Amino acid sequence: MRQNPVLLLGWSIHSRFRYQPNRTYLGLHYRSKAVAYTGLLAVTKKVFLNMSQENSRPSSDMTKFRECFSKAKHIVVLTGAGVSAESGVPTFRGAGGLWRKWKAQELASPEAFASNPSLVWEFYHYRREVMSSKHPNPAHVAIAECEKRLKAQGRRVVVITQNIDELHKRAGSENILELHGNLFTTRCTKCGDVSVNKESPICPALAGKGEPSPNAVDAKIPVEKLPRCKKADCKGLLRPHVVWFGEGLDREVLRQTSEELDNCDLCLVVGTSSVVYPAAMFAPQVAFRGVPVAEFNIEETPATSSFG
């Protein structure tokens, strides 16, 4: 049995909550009502907090959590789609999670891009355009302000996210590792150049395309009119610089992630079901060496019991 207890924290919003103004959460002070989804900013009636040893159930020892948080010098925040839910970012998972008649998995693959790059680019163009109307929610802001506040104290906060929506960056977070890439970055399939691209539309042929309705007609854009590399001596076909099904994560990103996980003394898991690998193993890996792990989710996840 490990000497150090494992800390798990999950906030539930199954019941209505009453926000308490001028109250401090996670070391941050807020004067206005905040979105409750991740539990970073709002108090709910049901709190899961595990301060016991292996195979125990979550308890509600908030005092112990605050003690761990106040002592932590290197905090890793693992985030997933849930942290962006309050921003209205579609996840394309579960019931109704289709784009036209397709599941995201059927479009987010090298094979799909090779067989129909026009359709894949329509899908990603739609996602890019949707994000132009979305904004960071209080959860993103809380994490960013936490990083800023603790930095002034000589403490480190780093976000390791599975999201590709860039909302952490827009909220002000600086230390970010994007495991699955970024919607607003492209990679040339010919020369390999990786560049930030926030043009809207990303190419003229995609203007007004990407309608998600199942009745929409595929644009069937000729490949030569799809996004192209801007290098004069290349002009190769661009693809979204995101990790597709069947592809491995960037080695350098994984190296940096491993380094952060090895050095952290507190890990927060926010808005992720912890079912996608290798990210699903990060928190259990940290917990295994006796580091406190706090889980913020609207319900227990398949990985919850593995933190203890």
Image (cartoon, rainbow, N blue to C red):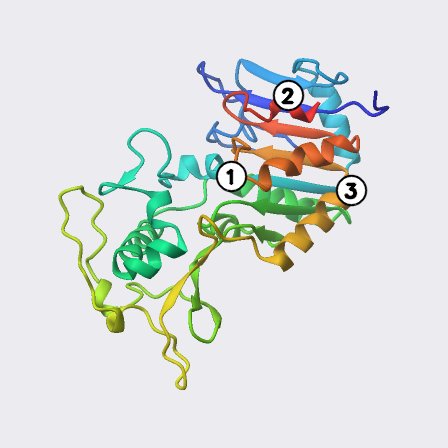
60 relative to 212 in the view: left or right: right
User: What residue appears at the point 68 percent right and 26 percent down from the top-left corner?
Assistant: 307
N-terminal label among 1 and 2:
1
Q: Nearer the viewer, residue 7 or 231?
A: 231
Of residues 246 and 181, the one nearer the viewer is: 246
Q: Residue at x 70, y 48 (%)?
A: 258
Check disc 1 and report the residue beneath it: 80
Q: Position of residue 183 (x, y in %)?
A: 42, 55
The kind of secondary structure element at disc 3 is: loop
Rendering quarter of residue 53:
top right
Q: Amino acid at mark 2?
A: Ser
Query: In the image, what residue occupies the spot 59% across and 17% down?
Result: 47
- Image quarter where the C terminus lies is top right
Q: Residue furthest bottom?
A: 233
Task: Look at the numbered disc 2 and give the secondary structure of its residue.
Answer: helix
Q: Nearer the viewer, mark 3 or mark 2?
A: 2
Q: Position of residue 69 (x, y in %)?
A: 73, 32
| Neighbours of disc 1 within 10 Å: few (<14), some (14-19), many (20+) | many
Decide which of 116, 276 is in the foreground and name it: 116
SS category of the residue bearing label 1: loop
Distance between the alpha carbons at the discs numbered 3 and 2: 25 Å
In the image, 57 versus 25, the foreground residue is 57
Say which mark, if any, is on residue 73: 3
